[in-house]
Amino acid sequence: MVMLLAAMAVMAVMAVMAVMAVMAVMAVMAVMAVMAVMAVMMVMAVMAVMAVFCVV
């Protein structure tokens, strides 16, 4: 019985750790996606400014 409870506790801890790991990975991916979007916007803005200067 004690062994069973111990095994269940270990499984629960592992499950919590797995969930935390998945959340951490998702958070990192979200941050990377935001950074990528910002980088694309910056490039577009630079291109727009360059185009304006070229026209002028």
Image: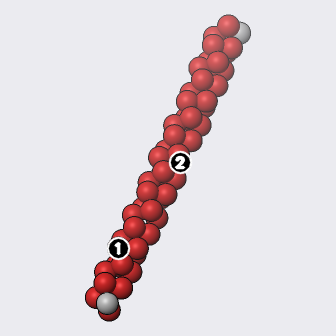
Say which residue appears at 44% left-offset and 69% top-offset. 41
Residue highlighted by disc 2? 26
Residue highlighted by disc 1? 46
- For marks 2 and 1, give the one nearer the viewer: 1
Vertical side of 44 occupied by 31: above or below: above
Vertical side of 37 occupied by 5: above or below: above
Residue 12 or residue 5, whichever sits in front = 12
Find residue 47 and report its horizontal and vertical position in percent. Answer: 34, 79
Outermost right residue: 1
Residue 8 or residue 3, whichever sits in front = 8
Say which residue appears at 39% left-offset and 64% top-offset. 39
Can residue 6 be seen from the camera position used here?
Answer: yes
Q: Amino acid at mark 2?
A: Met
Disc 2, SS: helix
Outermost bottom residue: 55
Q: Which mark is residue 8?
A: none
Find the distance from the CA under tag 2 to the CA under tag 1.
30 Å
Say which residue appears at 59% left-offset and 20% top-offset. 10
Can residue 22 be seen from the camera position used here?
Answer: no
